Image: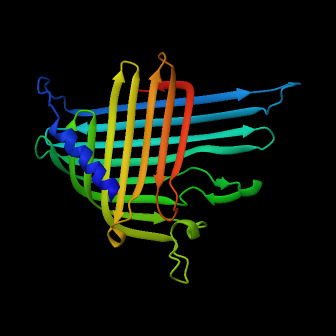
């Protein structure tokens, strides 16, 4: 609940300080954007007396958005795909990035700031994921195992051009199969459940802020509090700063934070990369 209170406080502050620019006439219709990126890193040693391990890593990512903005409605769909691997010495290839995220939001423009919406999201991954306790390879996930689907309705706000936030009631389904014991099983029952359905409150906030001509900050904060355990808040945070060096080269810094059941500890992932990007349209 502390996370929700903080998000609401930030929204109220932004709302009270918002200024709306009405000097530009709106442009209606479809707009599309997509950015594809490839990040490579390689190092090799031959008779290097100071020691070291050969290393190779790569990540490919695609981020896209389609928006149909009309006078009384806005339909925004986004998709994010990423996959990457790394090899260190003789350890073999290990996965470093794996993401499938789809989101579609339909908003009815009721007034200048507060608007009802309906949304659906899907999250999963492409390939098997492993942990390596004591050097032993142990599979913990794979495609659609787990998968997270969420449908929600509520009210959305856009206090300033760079910030969008929404709050509503949601239905979340978690689907698993071979790894149901990790993600969907209810330990209070003898049967291993392969799906879990929860109703609750959902808050989603998006930030897209052009900090400078060549620096873009994008952030997403997702909070979900199930009705049965309203004091337990699942949190997903994803922040990325992209600095464009030129038309095809960019540097990126990203931080991902997860705090979701059934895992008791906060998960953190950080990366810094320099790669090739291409704006498809």
Q: Position of residue 196 (x, y in %)?
A: 45, 70
Q: Quadrant of residue 273?
A: top right
Residue 143 in view here: yes
Q: Quadrant of the C terminus?
A: top left
Q: Position of residue 210 (x, y in %)?
A: 34, 26
Task: From the viewer's perspective, tell me whether residue 84 is left or right of residue 3.
Answer: right
Type of colouring: rainbow
Q: Position of residue 36 (x, y in %)?
A: 49, 31
Residue 136 in view here: no
Q: Quadrant of the N terminus?
A: bottom left
For the residue pair 273 and 24, the one nearer the viewer reads as 273
For the residue pair 257 and 143, the one nearer the viewer reads as 257
Q: Residue at x 41, y 36 (%)?
A: 64
Q: Position of residue 238 (x, y in %)?
A: 44, 43
Q: Residue at x 32, y 49 (%)?
A: 204
Q: Quadrant of residue 143?
A: bottom right
Task: From the viewer's perspective, tell me whether residue 247 is left or right of residue 225.
Answer: right
Q: Residue at x 15, y 47 (%)?
A: 114
Task: From the viewer's perspective, tell me whether residue 254 is left or right of residue 162.
Answer: right
**Residue reaching furthest to the bottom:** 190
Image height of 228 relative to 53, above or below: below
What number of labels is visible? 0
For the residue pair 255 and 199, the one nearer the viewer reads as 255
């Amino acid at each position: 609940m502390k996370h929700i209170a903080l998000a609401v406080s930030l929204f109220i502050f932004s709302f009270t300080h918002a200024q709306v620019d009405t000097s530009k006439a709106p442009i209606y219709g479809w707009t599309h954007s997509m950015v594809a990126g490839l990040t490579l890193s390689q190092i090799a040693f031959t008779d290097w007396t100071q020691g070291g391990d050969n290393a190779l890593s790569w990540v490919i990512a695609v981020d896209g958005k389609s928006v149909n903005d009309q006078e009384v409605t806005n339909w925004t769909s986004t998709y994010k795909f990423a996959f990457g691997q790394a090899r260190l010495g003789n350890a073999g290839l290990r996965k470093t990035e794996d993401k499938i995220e789809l989101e579609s939001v339909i908003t009815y423009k009721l007034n200048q700031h507060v608007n009802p919406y309906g949304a659906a999201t899907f999250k999963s991954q492409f390939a098997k994921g492993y942990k390596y306790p004591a050097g032993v390879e142990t599979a913990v996930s794979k495609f659609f195992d787990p998968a997270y689907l969420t449908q929600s309705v509520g009210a959305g706000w856009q206090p300033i051009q760079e910030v969008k936030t929404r709050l509503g009631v949601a239905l979340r389904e978690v689907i698993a199969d071979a790894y149901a014991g990790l993600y969907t099983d209810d330990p209070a029952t003898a049967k291993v459940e392969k799906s879990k359905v929860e109703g609750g409150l959902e808050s989603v906030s998006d930030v897209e802020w052009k900090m400078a001509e060549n620096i873009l900050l994008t952030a997403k904060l997702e909070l979900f509090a199930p009705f049965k355990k309203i004091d337990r808040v699942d949190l997903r945070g994803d922040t990325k700063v992209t600095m464009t060096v030129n038309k095809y080269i960019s540097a990126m810094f990203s931080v991902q934070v997860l705090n979701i059941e059934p895992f008791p500890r906060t998960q953190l992932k950080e990366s810094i990369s320099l790669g090739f990007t291409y704006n498809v349209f």
